[in-house]
Amino acid sequence: MMDDLEATARRGVEAAISEGASDADAWCERSTSREIRVYDGEVESLSDAGSSGLGLRAFIDGRSGHAYGTDLSEEGVLAVAAAAQAAAAVADPDEFGGLPEEPGVTEVEGLHSAVMAQWSNEDRVQLALAVERAARAREGVTQVENAVYSDSEGSAAIASSRGLTASYEATSAWAYASAFAGAGTDLMTGLGIGLGRDPGALDPEAIGGEAAERALELVGARRPSSRRCPVILDAFVAASFAGIIGGMLSADAVQRGRSLFAGREGQEVAGPAFVLADDGRHPEGPSSAPFDGEGSATRRTPLIEGGLLSGYLFDARTARKAGRASTANAARGSYRAPPAVGPSNLLLEPGEHDLEQLVAQAGEGLYVTEVSGLHSGVNSVSGSFSVGATGRLIEGGELGRPVREITIAGDLVEMLRDVRAVGAPGRWVPFGGSVKAAPVLIGEMAISGS
Amino acid sequence: MDPGLAARVIERALRHGGDLAELYAEDRHGFSVSLDDSRVERPGGGTERGASVRVVAGAASWFGHVDGLSEEALLDLADSVGQAVRGRRRSPAELGPARATGANPVAVRPETVEAARKAELLRSLDERARAAAGEVDQVSVGYSEGRRIVEVFNSEGVAAADDRTRIRLSAQVVARREGRVETGSHTCGGHAGFELFDDDPEEVAASAARKALTALDAVDAPSGRLPVVVGNGFGGVLLHEAVGHGLEADAVQKGASVYAGRIGEQLAEPGVTAYDDGERANEWGSDGVDDEGTATRRTTVIEEGRLTSYLYDLVRARADGTDSTGNGRRQSFRHLPVPRMTNTYFAPGGATPEELIEGVERGLYAVSFGGGQVEPATGEFVFGVSEGYLIENGKVTAPVRGATLVGNGLEALRAIDGIADDLDIATGYCGKAGQTVPAGVGQPHVRLRELTVGGTGA
């Protein structure tokens, strides 16, 4: 099966070369995925399906074009190659474009779990139902809108005219629930999530329980008075911010002058507690793989260390332009789009203290469990942001009354520099991409309430 | 597709029972190209072809999809989806051929226009944006086209087809002055062909540049409870997010909407009427039929301030004993249909935008939003204002930055005290249940008596 994918990718490259391309790479993938939604103790929907496709980049005289298709027959692959070739003719030549000079593969343990195959769809349904039950079992939960189990088992192969042919298999499973507590305009929602390599790695009790707890702790939330105070971002919110920062650290955004981190390499950009890295080969990482979307061997790249900006994320093109090496951050969402610079797995280094200790350290302040409007609310060039927030007040070193309809406005770099501590433990969350995050304590922020 | 094959697939899918079986077949084509830093880059496109089978039994949907449309693959798919279903067996209705409606005529098929001409179009947008002022520092523009030929057959005799072509231009401009950096963006698109860009497409770039340049002079936004005039076109995203999602029947039926159980209630002043309209010709969110083969229509969701209808697909309509409103939409053959908005907008009123603004002593003029987020269960929303101005003594004055609107849909509806006559519909992409579909958001200028403005200033 893997050989078959590699062979299709190889055929794609050969077809592009024989069409006249000077260089080409092909990405071929095949996956089976399932999604089960349950509601009120019954299956609401069950989807079980496979799909496959081929994406091909052709380089001709410094120009590049991309094409994709789902028809992997001899004829289908030829059509994709011809389309990539035709597309390339439209592009302007790019002196930095082209394949990586040194393609490679990193050995990554544990991407594929054999446990996946041992689960039947009936087992999966039971897991989803258990998540829902766990959420409904908490007193005060008025509704569980969604309880969803989802997984995917797939293979991807890459081939390039520089001689690389490689492939890998990976599995992933996740589940989440969305619970309500309270009613009417006082209704609050909570999300619980879990992810792993197979359904056996998911704890339905913890996922459902988390959804319930996150909703219940917000019941009765009111708008607080405006203030300046210490703020703790919980792991979900910290992950969303890390995702935004990761995007700004893309060398593409930097080189195009669209990042507030442009020209700040080696400068102080954060409090020393805020340590951020990208790691495309982390054994637990949902986005881990042996190679990136253009065949560079994955690695770990420090981004912020000791408060200093230590580096950016590069693909082959941006690396060539900057006179650096690729950090293997050519990300491919699927075969449908050519690779683009982006984070793989972002790791925010956990600290030593748990949430309780972090709250005690804050003394008086705000614990944020949800932000809204983050993506539209952050100016990536200036770093100014304004977002909606929900959470709890911190009073006398303990979590206090729930609050909502708050806006937090500030400056991203100022906020990072004011990070006092990062909590523990770290956990993987699918917000802001694929992020291992922990709670973050910020010295002072302006929160706007009534 | 041969209706005989569709009938065989549907019959196979119902072999172990089920109330409804459906075959959805699709041929997709797409092409896009962008320009950044005055260079044409990332040209690309592709084709996908496949089908899905769904069997509905009681409240449950069983679903699968496959690449390709071969008879063998389709029958295997029907077997695999149908095998988990248990229920009373029904005989499917007879199927005729599926014919496309032609509801959204396309004069110039985008795929017949040479790619080089699309690249030239991007270059002329780039020039227009750069001509706006020396402070224009960066320009990126994008062109995309997509065609979806879909056919839907079901066991109740539906045999429908739709040939959908969408086309879109977008521009983003960064302006810089003495260390200050601001961005502006604008888009134009429709369920239409290349003819959409016959008349001054460069205006998309000019508009993005104007927004970025205006923002260079912006002062910190005020905060507090203020009257707000929301701009036409993309200003309608507020209706889409804070009201529309709460009218989608899946949310309503789970009690996950503040609008549940409120049909007939007076939620706004009598002058307020709103539609979801999937049959408005050539509009961005329009289709001939929805993704379950139901003809699209104009549904009045608020009539003279009263809540009149929710938005239904087949499954949710069945649960409420009513008919689908033609809102069963899906991203592709790889997705289950769910109730989704098409083009949602407030009906025009009698005032002019100037009259709405004249009535405000001190307030915010929110022309455009950078996006927003809403919790459908409560209707609570937060919107970032990407282009906004102060209103002082009935006049639009200084541009502001960093403003957000915070509130909830019910409160916002109640607060509407004026609607202008300048309806415009903008091109949005709407995400829900892991699927993204094109959705038209629109309105004329609308005035809200009071809303919470979160700003960076005093």
Image (cartoon, coloured by chain):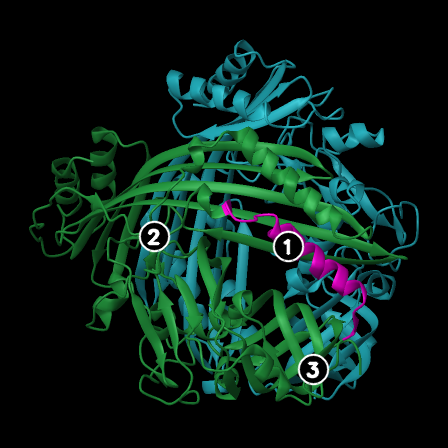
Magenta stretch contains residue B211: yes
Gap in angstroms between the C-alphas marked 3 and 2: 49 Å
- Which residue appears at 48% of the width and 19% of the height? A82
Picture quadrant of residue A44 = bottom left
The picture places residue A369, in percent across and down from the top left corner, at 64, 71
Q: Secondary structure at mark 2?
A: loop
Against B242, is B19 above or below?
Answer: above
Q: Which mark is residue B395?
A: 3
Against A433, is A371 above or below?
Answer: below
Residue named by callout 1: A432
Query: How many labels sit on residues?
Result: 3
Could you classify mark 3 by the number of other residues whose Cα lies within 10 Å: few (under 14), some (14-19), or many (20 or more)?
A: some
* Residue at mark 1 shares a chain with residue at mark 2: no
Q: Which residues are magenta?
A: B197-220
Residue named by callout 2: B336
- Which residue appears at 42% of the width and 31% of the height? B112
Picture quadrant of residue B163 = top left
Q: Give the chain letter for cyan.
A: A
Q: Amino acid at mark 1?
A: Gly
Sequence-first disc among 3 and 2 = 2
Gap in angstroms between the C-alphas marked 1 and 2: 25 Å
- Which residue appears at 41% of the width and 50% of the height? B191
Q: Give the chain letter for green.
A: B
Q: Nearer the viewer, residue B62 or B363?
A: B363
Q: Amino acid at mark 3?
A: Lys
- The quadrant of the image that shows the N terminus of chain A is top left
Q: Nearer the viewer, residue B269 or A41?
A: B269
User: In this rendering, would A115 be left or right of B265?
Assistant: right
